[in-house]
Image: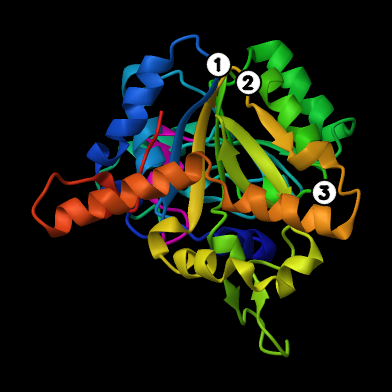
Amino acid sequence: MASLARLILLWSCVPPALAACDPSLSDSWWDAWRASGDAGGIRQVALTNRDRCAYIALIRRIRSESPSFRVLDIGAVGYPWSIHAGLTDVIFDFQATHSPNCFSRDDMIGAQNCCSSKGDACFDHLFTRERCCRGEQPIFLGLIDGDVTNTEGAGWASLFRLVQMTGKFDLVITSHLLEDLTDPTALVRQLPKVAHAGLVVVPCKFNELVREFHHAPLSRAHRGSIHHHWIYTVRDQELLAIPKLPYLEHDESFADLETIGLNATMTDMALLWRNHLPMAVLNGGFMGPSDDAVIEMIRHAIRGPDDVDVLRGEMEMGEKNDRFGGEMFTSSQGLGFRV
């Protein structure tokens, strides 16, 4: 196995023992999936502690009823949790071909014997049974190598040809991708062309405001991740991209939200969409007409109140009820929901 390939697999932040994900964690996601029917737009929003069990369990649950359910992951090389969980059928990313298949297509009998065997002699801590087999059938990933940001490039052309031949995917995953792109709207416009539905995971807006010393050589802490271009939230059932301008490093008005961001249950924001993903860039991308106007606009956009703030209130109320013996709320698992 090439060392680069193994490093890419090790890069994943996948929690251990994904096979043990509690299916009940997907209940609210399952309800949203079944209820959405042909209705388009955002169907589910959750704040999580980066535990992916809920949507892993959702995809497995859907597949238990529809074995032909097909999943595409765009940007999977950096965050290959869907590969480790055995969820995805095709990945599209830069250096995607360095995410190798577990088995050789030239030895189908050997691959099937491994997946149907009771023992684990075929597997190790990277190439697990979960990653390599779907039931007793071996998983062979489709690998599309290309620049996901270049919607006119060869990678997207290859993906469109595949979709033309086999039809749209049932679900496309974009996990910790949109915040890294200078023009996320260009990619978002392509998603309904290749899939009927999608799962988006980005940092929660509160977490993106937290100052931490991520790198020892830096003389001071910085908000969130230094390579992120956007802070995301959901407002009126629409994904809103707020430019992460340099001035935010010096804006002390967010001290209270930064404290909220230290809550581990609000690390990520995940959402499920059907048919299309409504998305807007703050003020259409225009930052003006003055510094004061921009600062006020960004403060208002981040502070809300918006759908995420409502969700946070529901989570906090659920935690309060739980402390006082009231009804258990799913935020105890790091999840909340609003449909």
Q: Which residue is mark 2?
A: 276
Q: Which residues are magenta?
A: 124-139
Can residue 135 be seen?
no
Q: Secondary structure at mark 3?
A: loop
Q: Is residue 32 above or below residue 166?
A: below
Q: Earlier in the sequence, mark 1 or mark 3?
A: 1
Please tell me how crowded label 2 is: few (under 14), some (14-19), or many (20+) other residues with Cα within 10 Å.
Answer: many
Who is closer to the viewer here, 140 or 13? 13
The x, y position of residue 335, in whole percent, is 35, 47
Looking at the rendered image, the quarter that the N terminus falls into is bottom right
Task: Please report contact status of discs 1 and 2: CB closer than 8 Å, yes or no.
Answer: yes
Identity of the residue drawn at 17% across and 46% down: 328
Residue 182 has which mark? 3
Question: Which amino acid is tagged 2?
Answer: His
Q: Earlier in the sequence, mark 3 or mark 2?
A: 3
Q: Is residue 14 above or below residue 173?
A: below
